[in-house]
């Protein structure tokens, strides 16, 4: 899953919801279009969250006296240029 799948589902859903006027017995193409649009947006958001989460790491160090030190590291790598 990635941005490409999300954009594909978003575009397909909007086409079905807004541009298709054909009808199939027992199938509401407009509703399927809106569902695919929602799923496409959800995939894009989850991909962005996952990409942001993978740049962060946390390490917990336990000392001899029982205290703990938490250190967080974030790799701010700029996105690749095209």
Image: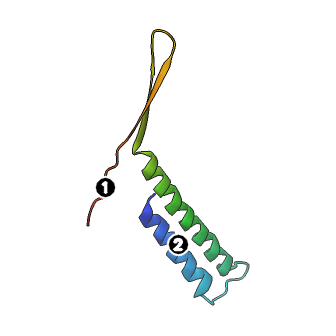
Using residue 54 as the reference point, say whether residue 32 is left or right of it: right
Residue drawn at point x = 52 percent, y = 70 percent: 9
Vertical placement of 55 versus 70: above or below? Answer: below
Regarding mark 1 in the picture, which secondary structure is present there?
loop
Which residue is at the front of the view, 55 or 15? 55
Give residue 30's position: percent from left, percent from top. 66, 80
Residue drawn at point x = 34 percent, y = 44 percent: 75
The quadrant of the rendering that contains the C terminus is: bottom left
Using residue 17 as the reference point, say whether residue 44 is left or right of it: left
Q: Nearer the viewer, mark 1 or mark 2?
A: 1
Quadrant for residue 64, please give it.
top left
Quadrant for residue 3, please give it.
bottom left
Regarding mark 2 in the picture, which secondary structure is present there?
helix
Residue at the extreme left of the image, as rendered: 82
Using residue 16 as the reference point, say whether residue 44 is left or right of it: left
Residue marked by disc 2: 10
Residue marked by disc 1: 78
Q: CA distance from mark 1 to mark 2?
A: 26 Å
């Amino acid at each position: 899953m990635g941005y490409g799948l999300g954009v594909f589902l978003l575009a397909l859903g909007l086409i079905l919801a807004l541009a298709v006027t054909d009808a199939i017995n027992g199938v509401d193409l407009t509703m399927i279009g809106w569902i695919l649009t929602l799923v496409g947006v959800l995939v894009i958001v989850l991909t962005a969250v996952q990409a942001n989460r993978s740049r962060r790491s946390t390490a917990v160090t336990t000392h001899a006296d029982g205290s703990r030190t938490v250190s967080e590291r974030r790799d701010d790598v700029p996105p690749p240029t095209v």
